[in-house]
Amino acid sequence: MTEFKNMWRNYVNFSDRTTVRGYWMAFLVNLIVSFIIGFIFGIISAASGSTGILFVSYIYALAVFIPGLAMMVRRLRDAGKHWACIFLSLIPLVGIIILIIFLVKPSIPDNGVPQV
């Protein structure tokens, strides 16, 4: 939960670094929160017959877009990659796999030697 809070505290910070654990734990918490919101409001929407209630899910997705993007940039910087590697995700299938590999790489400290 600490990493998720840090994501919100640094929601427009594109210049620091984020550890592997920090990124993936915040990603996991965000995934769980998104699933819970979608599940609850999906049930309410199905019960009421209205699709307008799913609007809450879209609002949450929009709210976490910039903090998630900033966290990904910080994670790439910590792995020794340039922020523009995010655009690899635009390449179908292969780009996402390459980006995930970059995101799970160990941190590279200032001296250039990777930490295990």
Image (cartoon, grey):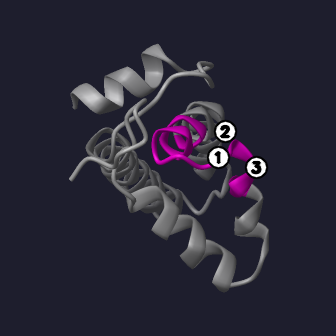
Let me know if residue 90 is in the magenta part. Answer: no
Q: Is label 2 in a helix, a strand or a loop?
A: helix
Question: Furthest residue to the bottom?
Answer: 93
Tag 1 near tag 2, CB within 8 Å? yes
The magenta-colored residue range is 72-86
Pick the front one: 44 or 90 = 90
What is the magenta segment's predominant secondary structure?
Answer: helix
Q: CA distance from mark 1 to mark 2?
A: 6 Å
Residue at numbered disc 1: 58
Quick one: label 1, few (<14), some, or many (20+) residues within 10 Å? few
Pick the front one: 72 or 33 = 72
Q: Tell me which amino acid carries mark 1.
A: Tyr
Q: Which image quadrant for residue 51?
A: bottom right
The location of residue 68, given as percent across then percent down, is 55, 39
Q: Is residue 32 left or right of residue 58?
A: left
First of labels 3, 2 by sequence position: 2
What mark, if any, has residue 84 been given in the picture? 3
